Amino acid sequence: MTSLRMYASALIAALAAACSASVAGADFADVLDSPAQISPLASKGLLQALVKAGSRLVAVGQRGHIVISTDGGASWRQSPVPVSSDLTSVYFVDDREGWVVGHDGVILHTRDGGDSWELQLTGRSANELLVWAMKRKVVAEPNSDDAKKLLAEAMRYQEQGADKPFLDVWFADSKMGYAVGAYNLIFRTSDGGKHWEPWFDRTENPKFFNLYAIRAAGNSLYIAGEGGLVLKLDAAGQRFRAVATPYEGSFFGVVDAGTSALLFGLRGNVYGSNDGGASWSKVDAGLAASVVAATRSADGAVLLADAGGRVSASTDGGRTFTKLTLKQSVPVTGLVDIGEARLVLVGPRGATVAEIASR
């Protein structure tokens, strides 16, 4: 896997499995059947993503940890979670309702701002849904080699078990949303996650590249993926179609810059489009390492962060960026702007409040 994000997640999962196996006499417990353990250090370990939910901050990370802050990141409390899978992304549509996705095909849902979580999907049920849908496709298109290829791939996933991670989640409102992940894993819901349907056959992704992020920008919905893959939703055709870009490296995210959409990824690469993805131009964000996170500030500025903790800001719709100087810099996987020249950063060292020294 080419992604820093995927590599880190896989390494964490492998280390966790090795540690579990090394405990003498311990019975194996599947992470899908084991609630996350409550730990006073949950906010100090690896956190993969962070969002605002009204006045709250919600961060997710390793071993099913979900932590909440109601005081701008000064303190955190852990929420009970029904699984202990590593969690990768979080999205809220308002201050109460949100979704979290992660390894082992996990999708979680909250209606109370993250205080409690219910399990909506696992890799087990996702595999069953995927195989069933692809079998129906073969029946409907018996002469289609593509349909047979998709079914064969779906059956291979099922044989491998519930190991495919979701890497991002996005909702348009409280009903319609998508979860995307490794090897072209993509599911859609139109009822808030009560039912999820695979869109495995509705992407122009013949190599089954990883899908790292899904976000709306302007009037379009984009997926950023491995190997330069960028997809855009064709609402009329109900499928994601490939978008040409001048870069063949992996893109880890998409952010709405107001007047443009920005793609960001490996080795500090950032590209912008102000014509709905028809054309893309390289943007110098001043970031040397892989750009892994983005957010919008209250005043509309776009903030990009690289894996090393360097942050750049744009106030002109993503055309130009100015590097910020932070009083404290740490490795980053996610960030939010909480105002008063302060950012909350999450990453391998947990959650940190960083003051902006200068712009």
Image: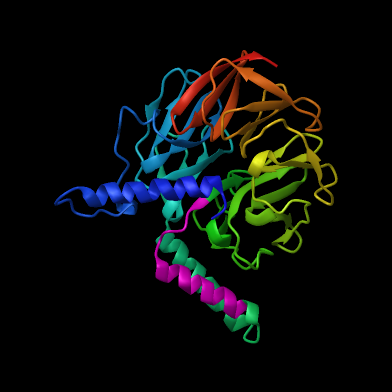
Quarter holding the C terminus? top right
Left or right: where 153 falls relative to 159: right
The color scheme shown is rainbow
Is 15 inside the magenta-drawn segment?
A: no
Task: Depth check: give the residue in front, 244 or 234.
Answer: 244
Left or right: where 64 falls relative to 257: left
The segment highlighted magenta reads: 147-166
Question: Which residue is farthest bottom?
Answer: 143
On the question of residue 108 being in view, the answer is: no
In this view, 115 is above or below 229: above
On the question of residue 80 being in view, the answer is: yes
x then y, percent, for residue 203: 66, 63
Is 161 inside the magenta-drawn segment?
A: yes
Residue at x-position 70% and y-position 62%: 238
x then y, percent, for residue 139: 58, 83
Q: Tell me the quarter of the picture where residue 256 sits.
A: top right
